[in-house]
Image: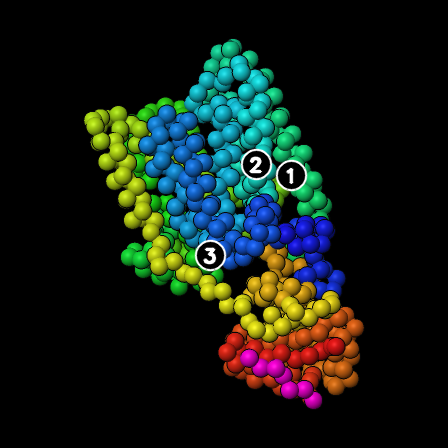
Amino acid sequence: MRKALVDLHTDPFYTTYLYYPQGVSLLFHTLVPLEGVLTIPFQLAGVGLLPLYNGVLAVSFVLAGYATWLLVRDLTGHAGAAFVAGIAFAFCPYHLGHLLGHMNLASLQWIPFYLWALFRACGAPGAPIDGTGQRRGLLWAGAAGLFLVANAFTEWIYVAFLGVFTGGYLLWRLLADTRGRAALRAWGPLLARLAVLGAVFGALAGPLLLRTVLAQQGQDWMKFPPRETLVYSSDLVDSFVPSALHPFWAGYAQALERQQPERNTAERSVFLGYTTLVLAGLGLLWRRNRAVAFWAGAAALAWLLSLGPILHVLGRATFTTFNTTVPLPYLMLYNFVPGFSVMRVPARFIVLASLALAVLAGYALTALSARWPGRGRPLLLQGGVALLLGLEFLAIPYPMAPPGYDIPFYHQVAAQPGSFAILELPLRPMADYMAYQTVHGKPLVYGYLSRQPPDPFVDRTPLLGYLQNSASADGLDPAGIRAGVQTLQTAGVRYLVVHWWAFTAPQAATMQAKLAAVFPNQTPQDDPANRLSVYTIGP
């Protein structure tokens, strides 16, 4: 974002720094543009990308906890209970799990901010619809629209999730919270506030949404096969098994991961927590009102949607001798709501279930504090619950990625003037190459995106296909190799960098034979410490 907006003054949603030389759209990439823009002043002040990346993730915990505190304090009127609810959501396993490379998903703080502003504008579930104070309501509706925009410029699927939540909220309002003529008359001001919310969102995020929808038309590569949705659906037991990051209770989750290796730890981190489940049950039992029922229903529905289109139990999707499958509500979204067939990961709905359970925990703690009055007792209760949450959600020692992109060759490249590109091998989607790019600042052939489009330059250049396929050293004659090298030189590709650590031993042997054929008279620049070799293609 800084490179596009400050240095190049160009469209941040299109780049020629990947998929060189033709470039590629970033509309379908998890670019996290809001966080990128917010860090620009710090980048200009000289703060490095590594502390900024970690800083953005650290701030997401603070803001997620604070926003949940605001929300639950409004709902319950109890600041202490709201504080514990903020801990329950901010440090839920979903949040901790998605620190593993998913800044877009870990930046979940805008979700509770949106709900806080929505309820201030339109009234909390279970409360009478207030038709008075229209100016104040319209201002809060505008704030809700801004927070929805913040979600859009962080992660689009959160907008989809909040759309489902808001639809359920309005349906609940209509069926459960509308009583008498006065309440019906209040729907006029309520609809006006929703119109303001939609107008703010449409004005600020609508153009990007429209552009994204239009760009998606006819792009078959955007659509994952249905099996992907099944792979990334939660298993029935996943929400009740502590995270694989837990220092003491990770064994069972790790065993499940070994049985189903296609889903990674981040997408399996959907544990809801026994403390929050018990508190939610107590809140539902002790505070039998429409507000608590709404949040219980929201938690249950979000959890059901996280299970995907059909039920999975311990990896099984068919049951009885008739191989029967059990359809679930997500199947309706997948088939009938635009966009859900592209999202691929139903398990992420657990973020709404985690938030709803945190709210229910707030209701339960409010009731417990009233049942156990006395000096210091509520504080002791809240501290005890916070400790239990910390023990259940613990994720230490957390996996860390060392900054291994500080390689001498890339500093040499950064010091070279002019515009030229780099070809990295193996030629496959690897985020490491973009980390190196933060040092050298040159365009890359091919790239790694959230949705991987075809690359015309790679597809029409036989030499790149030859280097991409490590199965055999045969397949391209000397004339084809010379023509391929000439194509790369004409396109302005100056260096070919081979990362030997990314090859198996047989693949490395094959690639060495290919490179000997492509560069018969060149001795590469080797860096044994970083296990790479550099060949010069053009001047």
Amino acid tagged 1? Ala
Question: Callout 3: 10 Å neighbours few (<14), some, many (20+)?
Answer: some
Q: How many labels were placed on the picture?
A: 3
Reading the image, the residue beneath label 3 is: 100
Q: Is residue 523 magenta?
A: yes
Question: Callout 1: 10 Å neighbours few (<14), some, many (20+)?
Answer: some
Q: Nearer the viewer, residue 68 or 97?
A: 68
243 lies left or right of 193: left
**Residue 439: image x %, image y %?**
59, 65
The tag on residue 329 is none
Give the mark nearest the N terminus, 1 or 2: 2
Amino acid tagged 3? Leu
Reading the image, the residue beneath label 1 is: 205
Q: Residue at x 40, y 24 (%)?
A: 290
Residue 68: quadrant of the picture: top left
Q: Nearer the viewer, residue 224 or 185?
A: 185
The reply to whether the C-beta atoms of the residues labelled 1 and 3 are less than 8 Å apart is: no
The reply to whether the C-beta atoms of the residues labelled 1 and 2 are less than 8 Å apart is: yes
Direction top: furthest residue: 181
Judged from the image, the secondary structure of the residue bearing numbered disc 2 is helix
Where is 241 relative to 142, above or below?
Answer: below
**Residue 365: image x %, image y %?**
30, 32
How far apart marks 3 and 2 lie (CA) works out to 25 Å
Give the mark nearest the N terminus, 1 or 3: 3
Give the mark nearest the N terminus, 3 or 2: 3
Judged from the image, the secondary structure of the residue bearing numbered disc 1 is helix
Magenta region: which residues? Answer: 521-527
Reading the image, the residue beneath label 2 is: 148
Question: Callout 2: 10 Å neighbours few (<14), some, many (20+)?
Answer: many
Residue 177 visible within the image: yes
